[in-house]
Amino acid sequence: MQLVLHDKRVVVFQPASRDDIAAIIDLYIKVYKGKYTLPEVADPAIIAKKVEDSAYFWTVAKIEDRLIGSVIFAIDPVNKLGKSYAAAVLNEFRGQDVMRTMVRHGLRLLTEKTRVCDIIYATTRTVSFAPQVVLEHLGFLSTGIFPNVRKVESFETHGLEVYLGPKCLEYRRKTPQLIPEMLDFYNIIRGELNLEEAETVIIDEEDPRKMGQAIAFDVQSDIEEIGEKFYRYQDKDLMKRVFFPFTDPNMLFTAKDGTADIFVNFNPLDGNGVIVGYRFSGTDIRRTLMWFCEEASKSGMRYIEMLVSAYLPQKQRMALDARFLPCAYFPAMKINDDGLREDFLVFSRSFESLDFMDLHLVDNNRRFLDAFMKCWYDLLVRCQPDFDEEWRIG
């Protein structure tokens, strides 16, 4: 595939190979001035593995032998789900359709020609409108924000963008079951996609100020040992795997009382963490989750994220009462045992002061920011001390 620029130079798009490793690393250093935190575009060994992995579709853009752009698509064939990420083009070639052509090629190949994916998502920086607008023009739908999720120059809020393939919504599970605080998030998507009304489920709240008796954790970071335990627990059905695509654990928090193992993927460069699975045998998972967050913060985590099914209102309530806040709604994300695609909510908890001063959001993402701030304010009010008693943990 080719693109002819205004000055008649020809851009050729082709699969990345081992021969491109040095040029790929150099591209991201130039575009991000050495501050891009994803190891798959900086570590030669990881790049070499991914360019030859059938679960990845990595495209590079070249003019003659000069590499000027790159984008990666990760593929989950079981859930027919894709992720487009690490999109970069040299500054001198921006505004000339290089990125849009490269991403559009991947979308059509994966969702129409091969039908490997029914849905593809991407995250965008919000320091300018451009990345969000490019994806909107390609047919992506803005479905949420990730507040202060990554650090480049400073902590940035990113947007979640979702591309729905032609058949995606035909197989979507209908009527999510949501606690009231989740309705604003769903209704934004409902209006865009003409979806049905959700079922509202009322569940008693727990006081987010009260953490109960402290739970101490041991922290492991041996990747091989963690991976072995993670998949052993999974094979023996000893663990509840939190669906989080394209992510493996590299950190393990084990409760000293033996009641919990929480598997996390952690990026030490920017303090980003996600919960990918847990084993729990105690009686109060909310309390365990809250004390885990205390330990995670001490371990260098600045942000933690997890996915919760839109059909499990009890877990939505548990996450919210553990001071996690909803920030995005992902329709038709995962295929269930009946072959239907289920919606998910994204919850996050930041251990830094939130900063939304340097945001440039398209309309949908601004609405998600409003919904997020409403939940944040409600939680802030709930966490205030009572007037008639001294606040205390307990």
Image (spheres, rainbow, N blue to C red):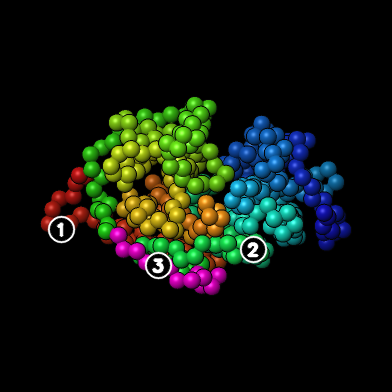
Relative to 103, is 216 above or below?
above
Query: In this orientation, which residue lies closer to the viewer: 309 or 340?
Result: 340
Q: Position of residue 42 (x, y in %)?
A: 64, 37
Q: Is residue 187 visible?
A: yes
Amino acid on which the number 2 mark rests in the picture: Lys
Asked if 13 appears above or below 191 in the picture, the reply is above
Q: Which residue is mark 1?
A: 387
Say which residue label 2 marks: 167
Identify the residue position indicated by label 3 in the image.
199
Look at the image and say whether residue 194 sits in the magenta stretch: yes
User: In which quadrant will I find the C terminus?
Assistant: top left
- Under mark 1, the amino acid is Phe
Q: Position of residue 130 (x, y in %)?
A: 63, 61
Q: Residues within 10 Å of mark 2 (few under 14, many from 20)?
A: few
Q: CA distance from mark 1 to mark 2?
A: 55 Å
| Magenta segment boundaries in residue numbering | 190-203
